Image (tube, helix red, strand yellow):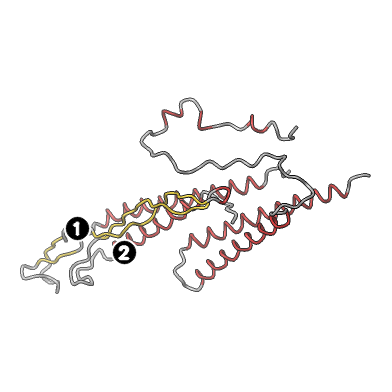
Amino acid sequence: MIQPLSGIQNTVAALDAERTRLDVISENIANANTTHGLDGKPYQRKVVVFESALQQAIGAGGNASLTPQLRVARIDKDNRPPVQIYAPGNPEADERGMVSTPNINVHEEMADLINASRAFEANLAVVKNEKSMAMQTLSIGKH
Amino acid sequence: MSPLSAIPQATYNFGNMPGMDAMRPNTLPTPEIQAPTPLDQPGTVTPGQPSSDSFGSVLGKLISDVNTKQTTATAAVDGLQSGQAVPLHQAVIAMEEANVSFQLMVEVRNKLLDSYQELMRMQV
């Protein structure tokens, strides 16, 4: 199989991983006020853990080789305790009037969101560059 | 003499520029990315007897590869449009790969046609 954009498999894997990270961040932001999660407890912040894994890649000349590629290892929970706020009118409040709210700081999530979207953008720039290099190479000898 | 023999002298090796070592972090692991293997030296092809991969079969393989790329891109875009969980970037990158492969095929075809017409114009 011809590989016109040869170095791109790593970038595609990184784009997949960053996409997952963006999805998890958006889930965190969406649930920043969820006091009653699926397990009855306040929502716990999720964190994406990346890892580098060997992937079979077809290199130059058609020979297969193993190249390290980024992928999502797991999606873990942030074990910081829930934030206690005093809201006696809330139906979720305990006998002391305290409500456990998720351990999510929206500012922190926004910083992560910027980070992840810039990383995505950087990988897109690699794709764009790779494509323009291929197209320019194809125009060698044109006048 | 090769008509493009002056080109190797003109290609700079940016990796060996003086002062680059200071900018290069030495904690990075050695990269597994391999340099492309150079093409076989000319002169080994004996004309007259078609080898196992003749020019026609190589060209046919190129065209079928391009066709496969186009089919993959179409499948990705179809999946995206029919609401399957195909990530947007994968569809777009598949389209770009198909586009570049197609351009490569068109360039090969143009070169073939050019040389054919050049031959046809030749005075005997």
Pointer 2 local density, CA inside 10 Å: few below 14, some 14–19, many at least 20: few
* 1 or 2: tag closer to the N-terminus: 2
Real-space Cα distance between discs 1 and 2?
A: 17 Å
Pointer 1 local density, CA inside 10 Å: few below 14, some 14–19, many at least 20: few
Residue drawn at (60%, 54%) of the image: A2
Helix, strand or loop for disc 1: loop
Residue A59 % position (x, y) = 53, 49
Q: Which quadrant of the figure contains the N terminus of chain B?
A: top right
Residue situated furthest top in the rendering: B18
- A22 or A63: nearer the eye? A63
Q: Which quadrant of the figure contains the C terminus of chain B?
A: top right
Residue A5 % position (x, y) = 56, 51
Quadrant assignment, res B122: top right
Tell me the amino acid under the disc marked 2. Glu
Circle on res. A14: none
Q: Is residue A89 left or right of residue A78?
A: left
* Badge 2: chain ID: A
- A59 or B114: nearer the eye? A59
Residue A10 % position (x, y) = 46, 51
**According to the image, label 1 marks what residue?**
A79
Residue B20 % position (x, y) = 46, 29
Residue situated furthest right in the rendering: B124
Tell me the amino acid under the disc marked 1. Asn
- B122 or B52: nearer the eye? B52
Circle on res. A27: 2
- B91 or A104: nearer the eye? B91
Question: Mark 1 or mark 2: which is in front?
Answer: 1
